[in-house]
Amino acid sequence: MESKKSVSIKNIINIFLPLFFAMLIQIIVVVGDIAAIFIKNMLSDQKTNSNNTIEYILSKDYTQPMNMAALSFIQYTLYILVFGIWYYKTKKPSIKEGFFSIIKPPVLIPLIIAGMAAQVLVDSVLALIRPIFETLFKEYDKLISNVTGASASWLMYLSVFLLAPIAEEILFRGLILSYGKKCMPIYAAVILQAFLFGLYHGNIIQGTYAFILGILLGYIAVKSKTLSASICFHIAVNLSIIFVPAVLFASDLSCVIAGAASCIILVSGILIINYMLRRKTTDDNQAEHDNTDAEES
């Protein structure tokens, strides 16, 4: 039986508390990085005092590709450590229900395909609306360039394509969604964590599609009862950024075709995942029932 939901100040605070600590970790990492650069410049004979101001550091040293990659790596590593321990202490998940559970091929394969289709669908829609919102796309293009551009490093790839999905799933689908389910219906908790997931990304373009993907990720986490499923889907979405060929979005017609095809694949993949998870639940319940009967006989 589902536990009674209680809308209290404590439960509401618990929903937003992980996000507050995520922002705090970001601030600590950024401030620590700027301080480290400042000290390094002071000890270097190649930097004059005029090149060691906060303004100069933020415009030059801070934005260097390797520095941005190191920041991402440190931030997401801290996320995994802090929120991973928090999630474990709060939920005390078993191996089956935790984020270390193994997703078997019948579910893993459609998860990966659906994740890639989701990214193609997003890219198709973005390509179609780009001429309408050119100003908004400037910040988004800069962000994507830092990840997939010629200056991107293996450390940035590791951070964005592996560490970030793990960290964000523990934070949003692990902690925030879990706290949300304690004081509101599941569908409302899924929408709320998706909304916060969109806000977390900090820009309108990425935030909008992050909200939609957040709903999908929340649905997968709820149906599968394990974060490993949503982590796999999230990794597939992020990795598709570098594997999806740009020729798919060369014209409006190709965008429409790619978008329609990816939409069909995405919906089909979700239906297959849903079916496989339902079947797995039925098999697990039957196996548990058989074990109980065997113990009683």
Image (cartoon, rainbow, N blue to C red):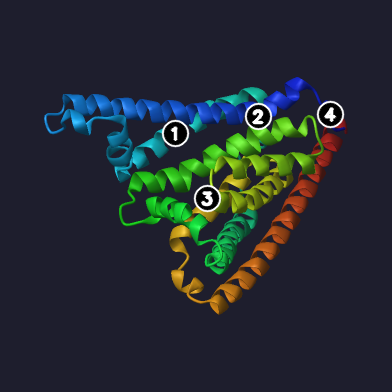
Left or right: 77 in relation to 188: left
Q: Earlier in the sequence, mark 3 or mark 1?
A: 1
Could you tell me which quadrant the N terminus lies in?
A: top right
Q: Earlier in the sequence, mark 2 or mark 1?
A: 2
Left or right: 232 in relation to 178: left
Reading the image, the residue beneath label 2 is 16
Give the amino acid at mark 2.
Phe
Q: Earlier in the sequence, mark 1 or mark 4?
A: 4
Against 94, residue 161 (above or below) is below
Reading the image, the residue beneath label 3 is 235
State the SS at label 2. helix
Against 109, residue 291 (above or below) is above
Give the amino acid at mark 3.
Ile
Q: What whole-number distance in Å separates the C-alpha atoms at marks 3 and 1? A: 17 Å
Kindly give the residue lying farthest to the top in the view shown: 10
Residue 102 makes an appearance in the image: no
Reading the image, the residue beneath label 4 is 5
Give the amino acid at mark 4.
Lys
Q: Residue at x 56, y 73 (%)?
A: 255
Query: Mark 3 or 4, which is nearer the eye?
Result: 4
Q: What whole-number distance in Å separates the C-alpha atoms at marks 2 and 1? A: 19 Å
Residue 228 is drawn in which quadrant?
A: top right
Kindly give the residue lying farthest to the left in the view shown: 45
Q: Which of 262 and 129 is in front in this view?
A: 129
Query: Mark 2 or 1, which is nearer the eye?
Result: 2
At label 4, counting other C-alpha atoms closer than 10 Å, the crowd grade (few under 14, some 14-19, many 20 or more) is few
Q: What whole-number distance in Å separates the C-alpha atoms at marks 3 and 2? A: 24 Å
Residue 199's spot in the image, x, y percent? 60, 42
